[in-house]
Image (spheres, helix red, strand yellow):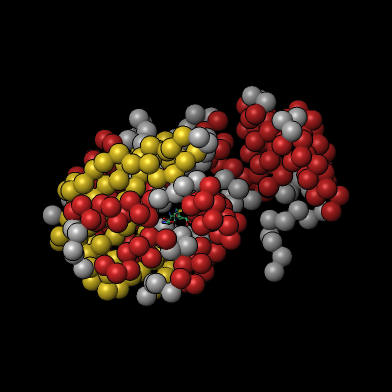
Amino acid sequence: MTDPLACPDPLAERRFAYAEGLVQDHEYAAAAEVYEQALELVPDWAPGWVALGKVRERLAESEAAAAAYGQALRTDPSDRQGAGPRLARLEGQQTTALPAAYVARLFDDYAPKFEEHLIETLLYCGHELIATALDAVAPSRQFKLALDLGCGSGLAGRVLRDRVARLVGVDLSPGMIARAQETGVYDELAVADLAAFLAARPGGEADLAVAADAFCYCGDLAPVFAAAAAALAPGGLFVFTVECGSAAFALQSTMRFQHSDAHVGDAAARAGLRIAFFAGAYTRREGPAGVLGRLVALVKG
Ligand SMILES: C[S@@+](CC[C@H](N)C(=O)[O-])C[C@H]1O[C@@H](n2cnc3c(N)ncnc32)[C@H](O)[C@@H]1O
């Protein structure tokens, strides 16, 4: 199947490849020039506009970067490149959610190398942290139905399987769901937005919901927590990780959201969820340093 985001012109494709090489060599001004020449050949190719926008940002040319992201958005309104949030960040506007098409595309591309890169290079342990929280608050509890939100390739599912009778996973990325399917640990898998998925489930059906390193792709957590609370039975547990920040929720230049402790606490209280476990935790590395986050377990009262 041809990739709908592949460059449609061979000459432009060669120019883009050359420009990418210039970016690797930190020759940003030269790269921007070559990107612009290539875009004359393929003016409707959104990935090219986003590449140009990123390089303009590196050159601290905010207006030119914003114009390039605007072009990307016009040529691909579903926004598989995340031009909208990049533009909003440049303009100092708050992004409340990432485009679903962007997240799906990002993780479809990532799926073939996801586990190797995440675990061996980034020392990711979000899935193991979920087990740590369960060991702390419900060490010998067996769950009837667990929902793995943003299940990815199924790392958390493999850690949870022995504690759960029925395991259901949901993810926006078909590529990740295909990997999760291969693990054989899920009883049911769905390609969907996690909040919409939760809202469509029968109320009170689950006694466990988990989200390992998935909320960094969700902005405002209040609607997600409300939907999770509705899906949980009384006494049900909701265990997740977030990345720490000082604003309630804010999209970073990494295109991941950080959340404040206050936002997590407020969203939990409003959803009728009580904090059972709350601790600092490092989910993965970024450069030489660990990414500081929180490991949280909430209980439906
Ligand atoms: C960093 S991965 C973590 C995957 C898995 N939980 C793990 O621990 O390996 C984040 C996953 O969340 C999914 N995701 C992000 N936002 C989502 C949303 N709104 N609805 C469903 N899945 C989402 C992504 O597609 C991706 O597979």
Labels in figure, total: 0
Residue 124: where, in percent of width, then height?
44, 49
Above or below residue 15? Residue 185 is below
Which residue is at the far front?
Answer: 120
Q: Quadrant of ligand 1?
A: bottom left
Res. 287 visible in picture: yes
Which residue is at the far right?
Answer: 11
Residue 162: where, in percent of width, then height?
29, 69
Report the side of 205 relative to 221 (left or right).
left
Above or below residue 23? Residue 127 is below
Q: Nearer the viewer, residue 173 or 139?
A: 139
Report the side of 277 relative to 196 (left or right).
left
* Quarter where residue 54 is shown: top right
Which residue is at the far top?
Answer: 60
Res. 270 visible in picture: no
Residue beneath the point at 27% across and 47% down: 296
Residue 73: where, in percent of width, then height?
62, 45
Report the side of 236 relative to 7 (left or right).
left
Q: Nearer the viewer, residue 116 or 71?
A: 116
Residue beneath the point at 44% across and 44% down: 284
Quadrant occupied by the C terminus: bottom left
Quadrant occupied by the N terminus: bottom right
Above or below residue 45? Residue 146 is below
Residue beneath the point at 28% across and 36% down: 261
Residue beneath the point at 59% across and 52% down: 80
Residue 185: where, in percent of width, then height?
39, 72
* Quarter where residue 28 is shown: top right
